[in-house]
Image: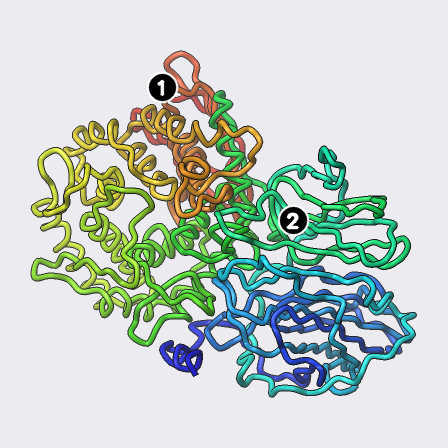
Amino acid sequence: MKKYLLLLAFIGTLASAEVKTDWKAQWISTERCQSASNTWLAYRKTVSIDEVPTALTAHIATDSKYWLWINGRMVVFEGGLKRGPSPYDTYYDSVEIAPYLVSGENTIAVLVWHFGKNGFSHVNSGLAALLFEAIAPGIEIVSDKSWNCTVYDAYQNTEAPFPNFRLAESNIRFDARLAQEGWNTPGFKNTFPGAEVVSVVGKAPLGKLVKRPIPLLKDYGLKEYPAVRHSAGGDTLFCRLPYNCQFTPYLKVEAPAGHTIRMQTDNYQGGSENNVRAEYITRDGMQEYESYGWMNGHEMWYVIPQGVKVLEVKFRETGYNTEFTGSFQCNDPFLNELWKRSLRTLYITMRDNYMDCPDRERAQWWGDEVNELGEAFYALSPSSHQLAVKGIHELMNWQRADGSLYSPVPAGNWTKELPLQMLASVGWYGFYTQYYYSGDSTFVPAVYDRMHRYLHETWKVDKNGLPLERNGDWSWGDWGEDIDMGVLTNCWYYLALKAEKEFALQLGKAEDAEEIGRMMFSIEKCFNTKYWTGTVYRSPGYQGADDDRAQAMAVLSGLASKDKYPALLKSLKKEYHASPYMEKYVLEALFRMDAPGMALQRMRDRYARMLDYKEYTTLFEGWGIGAEGFGGGTTNHAWSGGPLTLLSQKVCGIAPTSPGFKTFQVKPQMGSLTEASATVDTHYGKIKVSLRKSGRSILMEIEVPEQTSAEVISPKGKVQKIGSGLHNLKCSF
């Protein structure tokens, strides 16, 4: 009853989605299945095809994950998305299967993993089932009672400790003594029970079916570990990974039956919580196994009991399907390493959704996502853009009936609003950056009305037009201390209005744009009167030290005029309170105030302790580990990668001047650096910039993609326009 009442609090309609309604397939399961947590189901179907079509798309849905084989060949490794395009609905995949079919008899096999519990990135439907449909002229393969299905009893729960409550995934134990050998191949001789139809398509509990808006995962294949060492006692294999990655562990052993091999990573307690692990119970003889629940870390640990002979261990990296086409290099090795670790941190926090961390939560916290989506434009190929658009639709589809927003979503056991994170999300650095840098405005009309409602009904202003602070469910501005919530509220709200005004103009909503403009003017008129002390920005009644975050956001919002920059620079030379999340904005403000040398030195100072940990390839939640961290202290936290954006965007100066980089500027701020180069991949092609100081000049080599043009702005402000092609320029400074 509590779950039902919770769902009633949502608006309950999809803002925009490709919903398939013409299903001929049916939701199927088996009568033995009670949809308990960590349920695994095996499905088989044999079909005869006279002539293989040139194309055949299979539409596949389940709660929660599936693996697909056709004629014994793996077609999809971990399909499906964590559930929740809205509080009620489910995603489906579209998979091209024609290349795997043959004329004559074909065997389709699907392994389904039903999480069966809520998490911070998944809402449980309560029904373990499969929907499969592939239709072409003369071919109709649909899930119905003609399929066979069984609960795969070899997959089991472990004993405690279990993953923490934020994770929808369970530990996985596989008892090979109960394995159905070859069940996913054509030659399998055993018979599974007939499937049962268990639900109506398009209705609760699985709801509407929304097309997967992001690519299927990228499978890098099984690989050898770069290094393997044995523990002093010889019972544990410590297998070094090439870097912190999302992967599944594999083993091949020879053993008698009944021995338990335990598997976990060095990140098992990442973020000060128990995360996911796996176990394998041997059968007699030679055997191999891959645990399909992904883990992450820098090292994989196999705990091997006596009597088990290890023949082989490997790992399979999987991840979001994008390419590392962006780049940055300069003459400072520290900054190069910081960019590299920022990229690794970004990629390991992308999968079904952007996430804060890949171990403790795997949750779409939108404060993190705002930083991540900005980094993606400078580091990855355009396929990465789709992940943020998916998140935007989810955030707005989960809007509560009172108009408020919250994250992480999708979520079955979290409902708390963090007001400032929500303002950042819908505002200039969130929704607007996603539109302007990608050039994709398709989400704007779908979410505008809900965004407008949030900013004008949920938020209120005082008699002077300044926004009133809201506690929401968690009044959180950043980790750490000395957080001036009053100043931050005004800056984030102003930036949200700025984004909304641009969207209103784009949609032809002139009255909205005019009203938003008046609200912005009221804030501009009153902000400095209330908060400027003559040396810094402070809220009346605020008792902490001068907040570096507040000074930065005053600059970035544009509410701080240029005459205040000298005083603000003086403040930022001595105030160091921001966590890595908000430090990105502090550093950006220094570039905005034309202090690149100070920005780069602060960047080195702030990240020095983190990069001193040479064994890590990712960045931390706080400035250090353990007591030096924040919020549990994960060692792979999304919000810490802001320097990636700034090094490419500010040092090399590459930024769009029209949507999607159709036009862009190159306005370098090199500070003390003598060399720097960057590549930015856009829908038009790659922008490449190489900079080298020579005397009092900067020598520039700039590659401008076809159908685009650029403005080169020298440090002295001289503007030179260039068209597509390769250009060699010289600018004085």
Q: Amino acid at mark 1?
A: Ser
Regarding mark 2 in the picture, which secondary structure is present there? strand
Q: Which mark is residue 244?
A: none
Regarding mark 1 in the picture, which secondary structure is present there? strand
Q: Quadrant of the N terminus?
A: bottom left
Residue positioned 50% across, 65% down in the render: 119
Q: Position of residue 431 (x, y in %)?
A: 38, 57
Residue positioned 63% across, 77% down in the render: 35
What's the colour scheme? rainbow
Q: Position of residue 30 (x, y in %)?
A: 72, 82
Q: Quadrant of the C terminus?
A: top left
552 or 661: which is nearer to us? 552
2 or 1: mark nearer the eye: 2
Q: Whole-Å distance between the Cαs marked 2 and 1?
A: 56 Å
**Depicted 670 relative to depicted 579: above or below:** above
Q: Amino acid at mark 2?
A: Gln
459 or 114: which is nearer to us? 114
What residue did someone put label 1 on?
Answer: 732
What residue did someone put label 2 on?
Answer: 264
Q: Earlier in the sequence, mark 2 or mark 1?
A: 2
Q: Position of residue 186 (x, y in %)?
A: 89, 70
Crowdedness of circle 2 by 10 Å Cα count: few (<14), some, many (20+)? Answer: many
Dividing the picture into quarters, in which one does residue 423 lie? bottom left
**Depicted 59 relative to depicted 170: above or below:** below
Dividing the picture into quarters, in which one does residue 458 lie? bottom left
Crowdedness of circle 1 by 10 Å Cα count: few (<14), some, many (20+)? Answer: some
